[in-house]
Structures are given as C-alpha cells and as structure tokens.
Amino acid sequence: MKTANIVMCSIVLVVCSWLFLQTFEFAQGASGAMSPAYFPRMILIVILVTTALELVASVRLRVVDSFLFDWTKGVKLILFIAVMTLFISLLGVIPFMINASLALFSLGLVLRLPLVPSLVTAISLSVTTYYIFTAGFNIIL
C-alpha cells in the first residue's frame, strides 16, 4: 500500500492545489466582508496539510508491498460508498439531521464500532453540523 498511498496523495495534492488556485477566480466580497472563497480555501488548506502529512508518513514507511488493493477490505469499501451515495441522494428528500444521523450511524456499523458510542456520535455530529450551518453561516440545510 506504500506505492498506492504515495500515488494517491500526490494526485490529491495536485488537484487540491489547482482547486485552491481556482478559488482566486471567485467574486470578491464587499470591503471588509468575507468572500465566497473563504470556506473552500479553508477546507482545501486542511486537505492539503493532512495529505502532505500522509505523504510524508507513507514515504517514511519501511514496508514495501504491492500496489494491488487488499480485497478482504473490499466489502467495507463498497458498503461505505453505498452509504455515502444513499446519503447524498436523500439530501433533499428527508430532513438533514435525520439523514446525517442515519448515514453516520450506518458508517459506524460498517466500521464495526460499538453501537452506543456510534449512535451518540452520529446524533451529536449531525445536530452540531446543522446548527453551525443554519445559525452560524445562515445556510439552510
């Protein structure tokens, strides 16, 4: 997985760098106001930093194994993608807090986390995210 990590991290770094440069094409906000590019830039910076750290950790890894995917974990990957696809497709259909709570709880089950902490985490993250966006950013979810 060392080679796969290095390749994937390099691709993510290039794409995020390009997207970060594209945020400078956004319209500027009024004098002293935040521009629409503020939130995407912050997210891209976080992705760039974490990917750079992962790249350094992958390069320093001493074990060299094959580039091939570990098929024993393939079922978890398929379930993860299915839950995320279902979450995205249900965004406008059911309320956000219910949708997000069910998706996060399902991901906890896919990753075989304990039930009670998974449920508490799912509900608290959903409620927190909802109120940050609705009250803080004035974005209707």
Image (cartoon, rainbow, N blue to C red):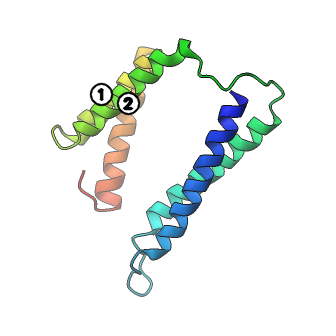
Would residue 127 be visible to someone looking at this image?
yes
At label 2, the amino acid type is Ala
Point 72% across, 30% down: residue: 2
Residue 109 percent coordinates (x, y): 41, 17
Q: Judge from the rendering whether residue 106 lies leftward or rightward of residue 54; answer left or right.
A: left
Q: Which residue is mark 2?
A: 122
- Check the image and report above or below for 57 versus 16: above
The image position of residue 139, as x and y in percent, is 28, 59
- In front of the other: label 1 or label 2? 1
Tags 1 and 2 in contact by the CB under 8 Å rule?
yes
Q: Earlier in the sequence, mark 1 or mark 2?
A: 1
Q: Position of residue 8 (x, y in %)?
A: 61, 40
For this orientation, the residue located farthest to the left is: 93
Residue 73: percent from left, percent from top: 53, 16
Q: Residues within 10 Å of mark 2 (few under 14, many from 20)?
A: many
Quadrant in which the N terminus appears:
top right
Q: Which mark is residue 102?
A: 1
The structure residue drawn at horizontal position 33% and vertical position 54%, both measured from the top left corner, is 133
Left or right: where does residue 64 sit relative to residue 132? right
Q: Secondary structure at mark 1?
A: helix
Figure quadrant of residue 14: bottom right
